[in-house]
Image (tube, helix red, strand yellow):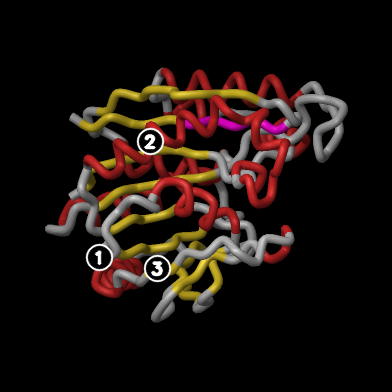
Amino acid sequence: MITFAAFTPHSPLLLETIGKENTKALQATLDAMHQLSEELYASRPEVILTISTHRGAHKDAFSINMHDEYFVDFQEFGDHGTQGEFAPDIELMTQIQRRMRNETIPFTLDSDASLDYGVGIPLTLLAKTLPITHTIVPIAYSFLPSKSHVEFGRILKDVCMASSKRIAIIASGDLSHTLSSDAPAGFHPSGEEVDTAIVKSIENMSLSQLLSMDETMLETSQECAHRPLLILFGILEKMPVRPEILSYEHPFGVGQLVTQFHLS
């Protein structure tokens, strides 16, 4: 069963060990992540299913990273001290894998002990207070069409709802990277339009709004939130959901959005 659902950013600057003095500018996001961590704890998850990647996305297939253990890896940002170890939920992974054998959507398995920051940042900030008994299922989106992401989400929903385990869903991505001249990708007017459209689609729980977003604008804004959100919306489709946007800010030209999807 699904007991928790959220969408979070994954900027490395959220960790003081990486962002240092810049982390202070993201206080609203950090406060929202702290609130979300308390909600996650209260949901008593046995499994955390993550939807994000910055290293493992395949062009033509969705995937699960199946390994006998995981650790967070922020060494590319000069952080050699932050640690986090996680175990896989082999049972749920196997159930997803078996279901995908009967589907036409391309699907594959990866095996990497290292969790990149797309997964590692949310887990570090949200799961640090949870009991060590919980396990994870790291899922990567693909570069297949948008509707394939939604359909993959629907399949994941079927598997999760059939499970007796308490499952938390955490999708993660940063919004536009072009919101100001000092943004990593520089300024582009599409950035604000894309972020506004994404926020509105969440507020309205409108899958059709997400699906109708202009592909060129998404590309020029250099966001990495749209695909994870499509999968998440596929999971939450037809469920009684109340979205709550806990924070949105962009002090460094990159949209940082924290949202909880309250399940009735």
Q: Amino acid at mark 2?
A: Leu
Say whether residue 18 is left or right of residue 91.
right
Q: In x, y percent, where is residue 264?
A: 18, 29
Say if mark 3 contacts mark 2, CB within 8 Å.
Answer: no
Say if mark 1 contacts mark 3, CB within 8 Å.
Answer: no
Q: Residue at x 81, y 33 (%)?
A: 183
Give the quadrant of residue 227. Answer: top right
Asked which secondary structure carries label 1, the reply is: loop
Q: Amino acid at mark 3?
A: Phe
Q: Please say if 85 is above or below 52.
A: below
Residue under circle 3? 86
Magenta stretch in the rendered image: 254-258
Q: Amino acid at mark 1?
A: Thr
Classify mark 1: residues with Cα within 10 Å, few (<14), some (14-19) or many (20+): few
Question: Front-most of 105 and 202?
Answer: 202
Asked which secondary structure carries label 3, the reply is: strand
Residue under circle 2? 36
Residue under circle 1? 133
Classify mark 2: residues with Cα within 10 Å, few (<14), some (14-19) or many (20+): many
